[in-house]
Amino acid sequence: MKKLSYLCGALLILGSASSLKAQLIDEKDVTVTMDLQPVLQLDMTTPDQIEFVFDEINEYYAGITKYGATVLRVSSTVSWDLYAVGRSTGTNGPEFWDQQIEYGNNNPNAIPDLPLSLLELRQAQPNNGAAAAAGLFADYSQAFSPATAPSAGNSLYVNGGTNTPPTTNDKYIGGHAGTSGVPGQDFLPGGSYLTQTGVTSDYFYVIDYRILPGLPAIFPNAADADGATFEDLITVNGAGAYAEPGVYTMYVQYILLEDQ
């Protein structure tokens, strides 16, 4: 038994000595590719259809407001801009509501071509990415104005059925047109409502809608894209014009795009 123990000890010493020699190494490489695709995600919570029914005189005079009707949540890996645009199928023209039902009696002063810009928006959170905006109104954060003091501050942007984004003179919900390259000047940086939370987040917007026909129904707050020219029915069609009674439809498209 003693002889066997000595032999084992010798084997262990030999093993330790062999570890001092240079090791044999065989290397293989694998290439790892990372493709960072830009991601822009706009989540929207809203009814499928928002209805405005004007069947009382006070509703014509004061308008109807739909509070918190749409909630927008933004997530983006790149700098971004967000805007709203009014659209229709073009039955009455690309800048007008589609007339579905007519209640009129062919009165020449009853106008069926109602501008899409008569729809007013109000965003609860101001646009903190529009410091370099050059227009009268950078966003839709202004309070709705009464018919007695018409204002273009909330009139919806319309581009005549094209894909043209708003200019530096027009309204954006978040970010803006321009190429300053400075965050907050004309874009908002990548981020998400998932991590930037709260009602003051630049990635979370609550939208109210209002339609104010006025008496007569001329939609006094309707205005062109930059708010410099009013598009109410009297301004466009002359004295005596008013909206033809009927059922009209249109839709609002929200567009989130990478800042250029």
Image (cartoon, rainbow, N blue to C red):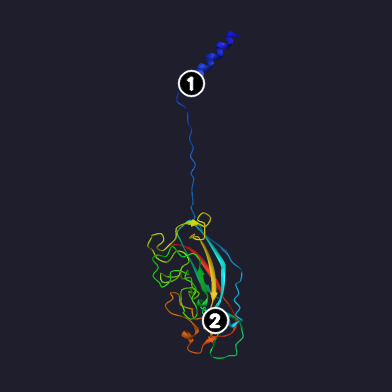
Mark 2 and mark 1: span between their CA atoms? 99 Å
Marked residue nearer the N-terminal end (2 or 1): 1
Furthest-top residue in this view: 2
Q: Which of marks 2 and 1 is in front?
A: 2
Left/right placement of residue 105 relative to residue 138 reads: right
Indicate the position of residue 149 as horizontal and vertical percent values: 46, 79
Residue on which the image places disc 2: 61
Q: What's under tag 2, amino acid-wise?
A: Tyr
- Which residue lies at the image location 60% right of the left edge and 82% below the top edge? 56
Q: Residue 18 carries which label?
A: 1
- Which residue lies at the image location 57% right of the left edge and 11% below the top edge? 5
**Near-viewer residue (191 or 36):** 191
10 Å neighbourhood of mark 2: few (<14), some, or many (≥20)? Answer: some
**Near-viewer residue (139 or 253):** 139
Q: What's under tag 1, amino acid-wise?
A: Ser
10 Å neighbourhood of mark 1: few (<14), some, or many (≥20)? Answer: few
- Which residue lies at the image location 50% right of the left edge and 84% below the top edge? 233
For the residues labelled 2 and 1, say whether their Cβ atoms are less than 8 Å apart.
no
Which quarter of the rendering shows the N terminus? top right
**Near-viewer residue (143 or 90):** 143
Mark 2: secondary structure: helix
Which quarter of the rendering shows the C terminus? bottom left
Q: Where is 219 relative to 179, above or below?
A: below
Indicate the position of residue 252 as horizontal and vertical percent values: 54, 71
Q: Where is 37 relative to 119, above or below?
A: above
